[in-house]
Every structure is written in C-alpha cells, then in structure tokens.
Amino acid sequence: LRTTQVSQKPMGRGYQHKGHAAMALRNDADYDDAMPNGDTPAILFVCLGNICRSPLAEAAFRRAVADAGLAVEIDSAGTGDWHVGKPPDRRATALAARHGIDIGGYRARQLAPEDFHRFSHIFALDHANLEDIRARQPADGRAQVGLLLDVVPGREGQAVADPYFGEEAGFETTWADVTQAAAALAARLGE
Ligand code: 4NP
C-alpha cells in the first residue's frame, strides 16, 4: 500500500515511484504478496485513449484520496493503443492545470491482462469502454469491473462525456463528472 500524491503518478509499469521512494510504505515484493488476498484497494480508470477522460479521472481521484488521507493504489489506462507512451491531450493537461493539478507527467498505456489481477476495481468511463474491458476480463481476475458514474447516486448508467472531438468547454463537463465520481468513490473507501 502506498500513499498517493496529487501531482505525481507512478511511471513505467505503474507501481514504481521513480525518484519518490520515500512515498512508498512498502516495497513491490510486499505489494505483490498482498494482491492475491484482495485487501488492498487498487483502482484503475479506463477510457479509450488514456489521454483525456481516464487521466482526468485519475487526477481527480488522486486529489480526493489525498484530501481524505486515504492510501489507495491508482492508475489509468486505455482500451486502445494509439496513444501509448504519449502525455495527456494538451486540453486535458490545461484543464487539470486550471484546477491546480499537474498531469503533464502522465503517460498513456493500454489496459493489460495483469490489470485484472493487480486492481481491485476497474472503472470504465463509458459503455463502450465497459464492454471492451469485460470482453478481456479473465475468469480468475480479482477486479470488479463497473461503469464509473454508477458510483454516483442518481447518475447510475451514465457515461462520462468524451471531450476528444468536441469543443474545449467539453473538458470542464468531463472534469465535473470525474470529480463527482472521485468524491463518491473516496467517500465509499473512507467508510
Ligand atoms: P479518451 O479520449 O478516451 O478520453 O482518452 C479519446 C482519445 C483519443 C481518441 C478518442 C477519444 N481517438 O479517437 O484517438
């Protein structure tokens, strides 16, 4: 289990705090040992490209858990591979910066088979993402897969708006969606 920071995320395979070893509460070997028990909350946000919606969900949730003093493993990924290795969309980075969060160091990665074992929860940003994730879900994975806005009372079954092909203002709608979900998730974890 590790503490989280708002503006920094694990790089590489997602669990190495390069240059932030002091942040780790235990080493990777401990983490791997703990995973099969399913005790560690580990949450993955998944959209299509991992450059707009899921990085914003990740950023919002990192802030929410930091504010709540919770320790949770957090990452994001895309179902597609077009943007692997790329930083978030500049509009998403600008949006996050307006809200005081630096996501410029995030790098897109694709959803991987081991994610179903590493994460306790995988949240899809929209229905297509949810279908794609479920199609790749192994029978022995521990991850519970669901739609992100299902965690928000009154918004069950709704998709987070995809701002990629729209106007810049769409990113604020996305941000409102993911911050709402982040708050609801953090509250649930804190119970
Ligand atoms: P995201 O947004 O899934 O929220 O990261 C998109 C990113 C890329 C594309 C579509 C949506 N694309 O078509 O490349």
Image (cartoon, rainbow, N blue to C red):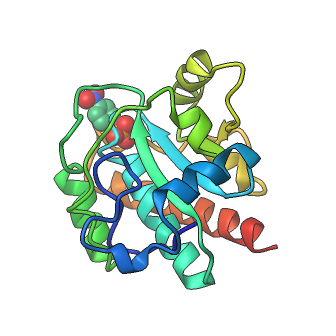
Provide residue 40's location: percent of width, then percent of height.
68, 58
Q: Residue at x 47, y 57 (%)?
A: 28
Q: Specify the quadrant that holds the N terminus.
A: bottom right
Q: Residue at x 63, y 76 (%)?
A: 70
Q: Specify the quadrant that holds the C terminus.
A: bottom right
Image height of 81 relative to 91, above or below: above
Provide residue 74's location: percent of width, then percent of height.
50, 58
Residue 36's image quarter?
A: top right
Closer to us: 28 or 188 = 28
Q: Is residue 189 left or right of residue 148?
A: right
Provide residue 7's location: percent of width, then percent of height.
33, 73
Q: Residue at x 48, y 64 (%)?
A: 27
Provide residue 109's location: percent of width, then percent of height.
32, 38
Q: Is residue 73 left or right of residue 170?
A: right
Residue lying furthest right in this view?
191
Image height of 16 relative to 143, above or below: below
Q: Is residue 153 left or right of residue 52?
A: right
